[in-house]
Amino acid sequence: MNVFDEIAAGYDDDLFHQVVAEKLVNGVADAPQPELVLDVATGTGAAAFAALQHLGARSVVALDLSAKMIDRARAKAAVQDPSGKITWHVGPAVPAPVPAASTDLVVCASSLHFLGAEALKDWLRVLKAAGRLAFSMPLAGTFNPSPAFASLVANDVSLPSSESEAAAIALHAGYENVVAHRLEVSSRVVFLVYATS
């Protein structure tokens, strides 16, 4: 059983991840209605549901390594996605289960620091030309994971300590039009990063 399965039951008790996912998705609400959104490391589905609600996404592919997280997301989908626009996948983030150049928007809330540079590269593969990317990263100085999670943090993407460092993650991976914002949620700080392919 992986550590994400172990925290799935109480994951939604902490509203932090929900708030970050909502704010992250709302940051691209000015874009045209997306045909396909890929939500990587969806957890219990907060960003996937936000893509339906705030962006009017026609379809969403939401994936997570944790079967128990996906089980919780599917249970919520009965109310939040009654028409079944979200396809749920259990499996690794890379490679994403969508074709090359198929995706209008890739969203990754609160997970890139576990996925690493390979994910950033894979998102360039799946995004359409001028497709959008939105991800969040925790602030370097305040991120303090438990030992079980600390061992999972990727070593090839540095945690940012400023907006410019957060933006540099996307710039160095080959993205354009990069913008980063600082977000504080109940004394925890993250950066919301937006870019195009």
Image: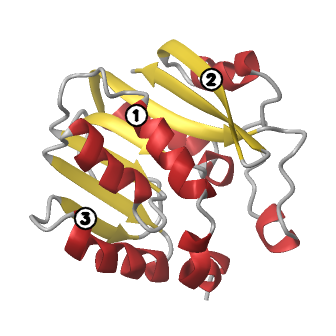
The residue that label 3 is drawn on is: 80
Q: Position of residue 85 (x, y in %)?
A: 15, 58
| Residue at image location 34% in from the left, 54% down from the top | 48
Q: Residues within 10 Å of mark 3 (few under 14, many from 20)?
A: some
Q: What secondary structure is marked by label 2?
A: strand
Looking at the image, residue 98 sits to the left or right of residue 1; the answer is left
Question: What amino acid is labelled 3 in the image?
Answer: Gln
User: From mark 2 to mark 1, how far is it between C-alphas?
Assistant: 13 Å
Q: Is residue 42 above or below residue 33?
A: below
The residue that label 1 is drawn on is: 26
User: From mark 3 to mark 1, how far is it between C-alphas?
Assistant: 17 Å
- Depth-wise, is mark 3 or mark 2 nearer the camera? 3
Q: Is residue 16 above or below residue 32?
A: below
Q: What secondary structure is marked by label 3?
A: helix
- Quadrant location of the C terminus in the rendered image: top left
Q: Compare marks 3 and 1 and give the one earlier in the sequence.
A: 1
Q: Compare marks 3 and 2 and give the one earlier in the sequence.
A: 3
Q: Which mark is residue 11?
A: none
Say if residue 121 shows up in the picture.
no
| Residue at image location 56% in from the left, 43% down from the top | 118
Q: Compare marks 2 and 1 and give the one earlier in the sequence.
A: 1
